[in-house]
Amino acid sequence: MSTPHPNIVYIFADEWRGQATGYAGDPNCETPVLDSFAAESVSFTNAVSGCPVCCPARASIMTGLYPLSHGVFINDVELDPQIPSIARLFAGHGYSTGYVGKWHLYGSPDGAYGRRKAYVPRDYQLGFDEWKGFECTHDYNDSWYFHNDDPTPRRWDGYDAFAQSNEAARFIRDRSRAGAPFLLMLSWGPPHFPLHTAPEEYRARYESRPIELRPNVPEELRELAQTELRGYYAHIAAIDDALRTVLDAIDESGVADDTIVVVTSDHGDMRQSQGLRTKLFPWDESIRVPFLLRWPALQGRAGSEISVPIDTPDHLPTLLGLAGLPVPDRIEGRDWSPLIRGEATPTGDEAALLIMAAEFHELRLTGMEAYRGLRTARHTYVRTRSGPWLLYDNQADPYQMRNLVGDPRHAELQANLDTRLAARLGAMGDRFEEGRTYLERAGLSHYREANDPVRNAWVDPWGTTDRP
């Protein structure tokens, strides 16, 4: 049934890096469904998660705000339950709204994961009409959820990404018969670790398979990376089949032309690139994510690419813009819908803002400082309070193995990006204070991850970077 505004199905995985897809050229990936979808979509080829860790990224997706504005700048911080959310904004214009899957926005004020398995009260579900979620679990084969205001836990059947996708398909079929447009968000837990828990069928595909590693995995970690990535790619193959379930439901309901479908992730995953384990870091494996958007009524079924580095706070205003709805002034992200509509072209100066406001967990474990930075279509520039830290030409050095900070041949580029970063921070009122200052001001200094000890101070494997 056609509606005045497009339906929106927003699908996001957890910790799926942008390089790990077939359409992006990863030879290890078995993602035929995603690849076919990409061929019909707008692909933002430099999409990033500017604060690459679960809760801050999810809060930005929900609000269109940067971490220091919505307040969730480390993991397990409670997002203000009354904040204007994506569900509330779309519902205000007649949309029926639904959410299925991992939540991770209720927070654990004890700082020790105390509410990860707790019922998320209805007031904390951010206004979704239909909510079937769970704060946080990574046991994908023994996974639970709560439904709206019922505090009784219910179990997903089997591998949760499959069951959640079946529930998303039910929602789509039900809402497609109504007269109102709908917004559905589907949140998968995989391919976030543990990496050995994909269904057996998918693990078997990779059991003895050689993995083609990225060149920036140090030699001494290559065997470990092979083992980890077999499990990582098995999860990805599984969620590719889960994607088919959702796309089939859209097609079978007759609403494909009138439905915007987004496939993305909250952040990426290092998996031993640069000698690092998971996320929080400003390298591309951690910050780069897939971002595919299909809307046949606008673009037909012809795929295209946009080089602008869309960031998580940009998702909400861009969807509002595409739906023809006003973007509230308080939203900090940028509306890129004019590019998607073909009403504007990139200038080449666009830049995503990288923000890690405080040292916690992986930053602390590796002895790194909080940072601010810019990711343009070509360059990555990052500084800490100690000074400039990273500068990469991502076209000449796509695996980021030659840090150009302090190189006289690139002094002008470094100065230009530093000036642009300072201007961006100034416009936002970000004074780039010490991480501990933000933690203390927000009452978060007791959080366990904010007090992790240094276990293995990072050293640049390629010898081009001083540790901040």
Image (cartoon, helix red, strand yellow):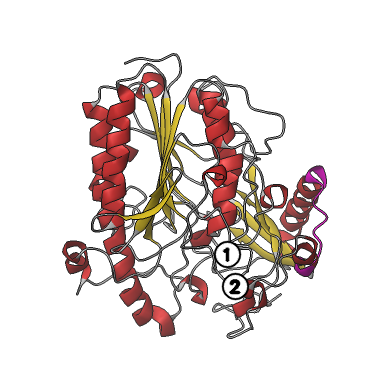
- Of residue 124 and residue 238, the one placed in the foreground of this image is 124
Residue at mark 1 to residue at mark 2: CA–CA distance: 9 Å
In magenta segment, residue 126: no
Residue 202 against residue 328 in the figure, above or below: below
In magenta segment, residue 430: yes
- Give the residue number, with chain letter if any, for mark 2: 361
Q: Residues within 10 Å of mark 2 (few under 14, many from 20)?
A: many
Q: Dot 1 lies on which element?
A: loop
Splitting the image into 4 quarters, where does residue 225 fall? bottom left
Question: In the rendering, at what x and y percent does residue 80 appear?
Answer: 65, 47
In this image, 376 relative to 395: left or right?
right
* Residue 212 seen: no
- Give the residue number, with chain letter if any, for mark 1: 280
- Of residue 126 and residue 200, the one placed in the foreground of this image is 126
**Residue visible at 20% across and 62% down in the picture:** 202
Splitting the image into 4 quarters, where does residue 262 fall? top left
Label total for image = 2
**Residue visible at 73% across and 63% down in the picture:** 383
Splitting the image into 4 quarters, where does residue 92 fall? top right
Mark 2 and mark 1 in contact (Cβ < 8 Å)?
yes
In this image, 102 relative to 21: left or right?
right
Question: In the rendering, at what x and y percent does residue 246 appear?
Answer: 28, 39
- Of residue 236 and residue 342, the one placed in the foreground of this image is 236
Query: Which quadrant, please, contains the C terminus?
Result: bottom right
Question: In the rendering, at what x and y percent does residue 36 appear?
Answer: 27, 39
Q: Amino acid at mark 1?
A: Leu
Residues shaded magenta: 426-436
Q: Amino acid at mark 2?
A: His
Q: Residues within 10 Å of mark 1 (few under 14, many from 20)?
A: many
Residue 302 against residue 10 in the figure, above or below: above
